[in-house]
Amino acid sequence: MSERPASPDLARALWGFVEAFVVGGALVALWMMPQWLWTGDVKVVGCDRLSPAFVERTAGLPAHATLYRVDPEAIRRRLMAVSAIENVRIRRWLFPPRLEIAIRERMPRAAVLGTGGYLDAWGESFTLPGSPVTPPVTALLGSASLSPESRLALRTLLGSWPRGSRGTLDLRDPASWSVTMDGVTLGLGSPTDLSRKLSVYAHLQPLARQSGKTLQYVDLRFPEAPTIRTSEATR
């Protein structure tokens, strides 16, 4: 006597149970994934003068939020409001679940006298939280910010600044800049053609030493006909 085949209703019921078991298991596994159980692990990279703790506080990370609900763009906007930060990159990593904040700080190329602020190589003004730093160059500004043309000229000036040299930039008069570099005052005049003016000075310095003189002042307003003032070199 042959066995009776299972009824279609019983087969469908068994298959429905298997489907429900698989789907339920998948949902439980998804819910238990570490991204949903993220505990706020954050990795901050790129810090030099800013502390990772300061960056995390400023980022304003939401408490008890899943990693999927963290808004990288909102965090970036909050961090970019810090003048000492030049750029920010936010990345969410799923395995292991963590948030990575990579920042690029502004480098203080000159300290602005009387303000406690700094200028970076692009002429952008910024402040640094925490302990002050002492770059080798100080700057005198006539206003809180420089014009785009002045920032471009300042970039040329700082880019040509000899490594290890100390000095002061007097930028208060937009039409008449002057620089004191290692004790030598340079009258630059308008901040145009700075590369040529600084090249002329670099050529005059060794010539003065060879003749036993020390440069005190160089008028570079007209680089094709510079005027110099010297003193006898001390040995």
Image: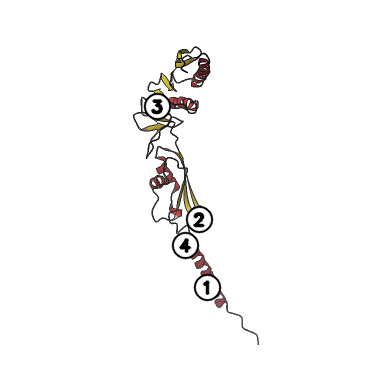
Query: Is tag 1's residue or tag 3's residue first in the polypeptide sequence?
Result: 1
Distance from disc 1 to disc 3, alpha carbons, whole Å, reads 77 Å
Query: Is tag 2's residue or tag 4's residue first in the polypeptide sequence?
Result: 4
Q: What element carries label 3?
A: strand
Q: Is residue 220 visible?
A: no
104 vs 215: above or below: below
- The residue under label 3 is 139
Looking at the rendered structure, the kind of residue marked 1 is: Phe
Q: Residues within 10 Å of mark 4 (few under 14, many from 20)?
A: few
- The residue under label 4 is 31
Distance from disc 2 to disc 1, alpha carbons, whole Å, reads 34 Å
Q: How crowded is mark 3: few (under 14 residues within 10 Å), some or many (20 or more)?
A: many
Residue at 55 percent of width and 72 percent of height: 15
Query: Is tag 3's residue or tag 4's residue first in the polypeptide sequence?
Result: 4
Camera-nearest label, 3 or 4: 3
Camera-nearest label, 3 or 2: 3
Q: What element carries label 4?
A: helix
Q: In this view, does 140 lie to the left or right of 152?
A: left
Looking at the rendered structure, the kind of residue marked 3 is: Ala
Looking at the rendered structure, the kind of residue marked 2 is: Pro
